[in-house]
Amino acid sequence: MFIQDDNISKTKQAILNSALILFVDKGYFNTSIPDLVKHSGVSTGSIYHGFGDKESIAETLMQSLLTQVENEQKQILATYASSWDRFYGLCKWMFYTAETYPQIMQFILNARHKEFLPDALPICSAKPFVILRDVISQGMEQGNLKKMDVMVAAASSYGGVLRIIQLGLDGLLEHPLNHYLDDITKTCWSSISVDKQTD
Amino acid sequence: MFIQDDNISKTKQAILNSALILFVDKGYFNTSIPDLVKHSGVSTGSIYHGFGDKESIAETLMQSLLTQVENEQKQILATYASSWDRFYGLCKWMFYTAETYPQIMQFILNARHKEFLPDALPICSAKPFVILRDVISQGMEQGNLKKMDVMVAAASSYGGVLRIIQLGLDGLLEHPLNHYLDDITKTCWSSISVDKQTD
DNA sequence: GTCTATAGTACGATAGAC
DNA sequence: GTCTATCGTACTATAGAC
């Protein structure tokens, strides 16, 4: 179970969990309501009673996952104070999630939201991505990072990390994702840090 | 006109060009054959005569764009020899393409190929992405780059570059993409280069 | 709130004239 | 090789009993 939220009825949770699995596996448009009925065990009537239409299932799913991610991130921020510790903590959590719940990562990173949620903003303007950038801004203000455009710094640091997560999800890495965590975070961080790291 | 290939009839080229625009704008599944008819001015019959089915349009489009990209890359490799020059040249070309033909970049980077081309390999195993990685391998063999896992090095270097291209395509950057080229390439390269760069 | 049955529609694909 | 007209289907969404 990916979605567990007391504000959402058990029936709706079952639908959302099936939706996550099927949307990631087959894609949103290749997943029909009958597919969801079969996978979730919930009837057509209940699905439409709970969500109104198909698009709203994807919308609720996205919202729910982003909120979940945001909460996990806040816990990490509350645990660590320095910008490196926060950066590493956030990356470690992303690696862990990608390995343990690949569907969640795939859906957030990969899903062509614009196709089925035409009014949604690009995923990079969602809160969890803003939190990632804020950690970089913080490091720059405190003088631990080179002064540069925040977008450039954020892209340099998280770009490599997210890229290797994607490679892992696509099954193109030799080792399990976790094997790369320390190397990629150190390498990416070194590109924006004022401390020149030695190997 | 994005697709210009003497091996492909004018009619098919018109369809492919409309397909690129509509697939990127509305998405593959939100683009119907009637949409393609209206946009391209080619009739349903000719579309099916030329391609057999809808999926094959996307397949041909992808193939055609990847070949085009590969050829441009080969020209760059033929012009420059050192790994930095090649890296910079390839990145510069990607920036230029993303600004001049955003649809091409969007389709290659963004399209959820797995959804409509179920048999396609992940995009990162396509030739143009292999060429990007090869430049990194070359730099490592010649001793210009730190010895590290090639995937880690490739992700660190291109990850940031591709990320900022994505941010640009999503309209989240203050300045035009080109403004960031030198900063991001230098920053990303510094993370894997043996020469510590100073600002 | 949950279910089954079905309405309505828009699509992918084909047939067949020119 | 190009076109118009149309078929068959599978889907989203609704109606209405329990």
Image (cartoon, coloured by chain):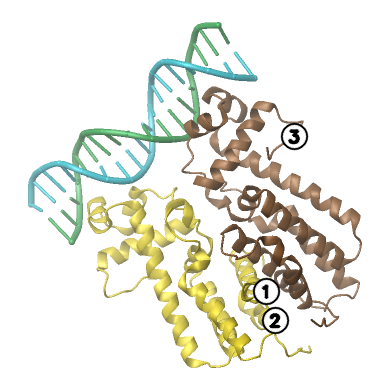
Chain colours: A yellow, B brown, C green, D cyan
Badge 3 amino acid: Asp
Q: Position of residue B156 (x, y in %)?
A: 71, 73
Q: Position of residue A9 (x, y in %)?
A: 24, 68
> Which residue is denoted by mark 1 in the rendering?
A156
Q: Which of B14 and B28 is in front in this view?
A: B14
The answer for how far apart the CA atoms under marks 2 and 3 are is 43 Å
Q: Where is residue A113 in the image (x, y as percent from the top left)?
A: 47, 57
Which residue is found at the position 80% from the left and 49% from the top?
Answer: B72
The C terminus of chain B lies in which quarter of the figure?
A: bottom right
Tell me if residue A188 comes above or below residue B125 in the rendering. Answer: below
Q: Quadrant of residue B2?
A: top right
Tell me if residue A140 comes above or below residue A152 in the rendering. Answer: below
Badge 2 amino acid: Ile
The answer for how far apart the CA atoms under marks 1 and 2 are is 7 Å
Q: Position of residue A120 (x, y in %)?
A: 44, 59
Mark 1–mark 2 CB contact (< 8 Å):
yes
> Which residue is denoted by mark 3 in the rendering?
B5
Question: Dot 2: what SS?
Answer: loop
Q: Nearer the viewer, mark 2 or mark 3?
A: 2
Tell me if residue A160 comes above or below residue A78 in the rendering. Answer: above
In the displayed structure image, the side of residue B75 where residue B116 appears, left or right: left
The N terminus of chain B lies in which quarter of the figure?
A: top right
N-term mark: 1 or 2:
1
In the displayed structure image, the side of residue A84 where residue B141 appears, left or right: right
Which residue is found at the position 61% from the left and 49% from the top?
Answer: B107
> Which residue is denoted by mark 2 in the rendering?
A192
Q: Tell me if I can see residue B1 in this picture.
A: yes
Q: Of the numbered discs in the image, which one, if any, rests on residue B114?
A: none
Does label 3 lie on the same chain as label 1? no
Which residue is found at the position 60% from the left and 32% from the top?
Answer: B15
